[in-house]
Image: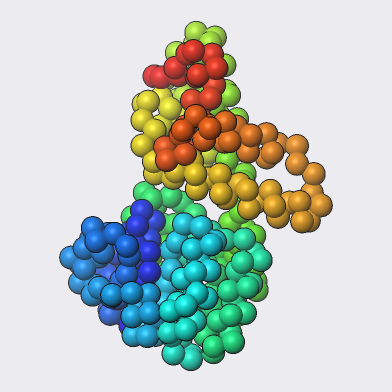
Amino acid sequence: MKIGFIGVGNMGGPMCRNIIRNTNHEVVVFDLSPGAVKACTDLGASSAASVADVASRCDVVITSLPIPRIVEEVTLGAGGIADSAKPGTVFIDLSTNSPATAKHVAEGMAAKGIRMLEAPVSGGTARAAAGTIVIMVGGDETVFEQNLPLLKSFSGEVIHMGGIGYGSTAKLINNMLAFCNSAAAAEALMIGKRSGIDLTKLDAVIRNASGMSAGYANLSAKVLAGDFTATFALDLAHKDMRLALQMADELGVPGMIAPQVMSLMRMARGMGLGSSDSAAIMRVYETALNEDVRA
């Protein structure tokens, strides 16, 4: 098959490169960053001139894009995938979306004879590079089974969640939980700092005890090293949390914890930390208390 991949940045790039390494498919890539494209073409992919060029040439078109608005532009906008792909093409969106946007895009694709899977991923850039990410798929089960070998070529776990919208639902719930765990970790580490305990020893305890979570592990590694270089930017975390809270509101679920975490994110973004790692929520505590939390 000929596989098109649109959006080969921090997350899309490693996933695309694993497809190149692990399959015999011909891969065509497009991204606004020449460097991101080159990282894929150096491994054997070919480059395309535009979204339309990718869509018109490929049997399967994959996207990995930052926000729902861009997903809609690339898929349903003028010269987008729906305009350019052949009937019978399979479209797989790895972006984090709202369930409503995923359904809207799927409807637009279906009208052009294009079959869609929404397949958001979880695990971050390190697991994307290692090929161990988790993929949560929404869409027709037959289309899912037909494309399962392709999805497995760049992941460690692929789960079919149900129809279109349920992949996004699973991803937003998972991320909301991870962000809440990270916020609790930031508060806990600041308590530890102010208590005078050895933070390296405290970290060793938590990592081997009941307080451990992926949210804790990711935040503590960044905070204790004082390195807030983005592997998952705060702006993207804020976007995902906003979508999760929107879903909670639509479903009538009261928010006792997640809205407070959202406020913490807003404060960090207000401090100009949006492009820093999501762990930069710790800087809100550090600034308020004039005390850095470092190993």
Determine which quarter of the picture holds residue 184.
Answer: top right
Whether residue 241 is situated above or below residue 291 in the rendered picture = below
**In this picture, residue 255 sits left or right of residue 195:** right
Quarter of the image that includes the N terminus: bottom left
Residue 155: image location, x then y, percent:
42, 62
Instruction: Return the residue nearer the eye: 144 or 226.
Output: 226
Q: Is residue 256 above or below residue 289?
A: below
Residue 170 showing in the rendered view = yes
Q: Residue furthest left?
A: 42
Residue closer to the observer: 23 or 95: 95
Residue 104 position within the rendered picture, expressed as x and y whole percent measured from the top left: 63, 73
Q: How is the image coloured?
A: rainbow
**Which residue is at the front of the view, 111 or 64?**
111
Whether residue 151 is visible to the viewer of this picture, yes or no, is no
For residue 145, above or below residue 134:
below
Check the image and report above or below for 235 versus 107: above
x%, y% of residue 111?
Answer: 59, 87
Q: Which residue of the protein is positioned furthest toward the top in this rendering?
A: 196
Question: In front here: 180 or 131?
Answer: 180
> x, y percentage for residue 107?
62, 79
Q: Residue shown at 43%/84% (left/top)?
A: 84
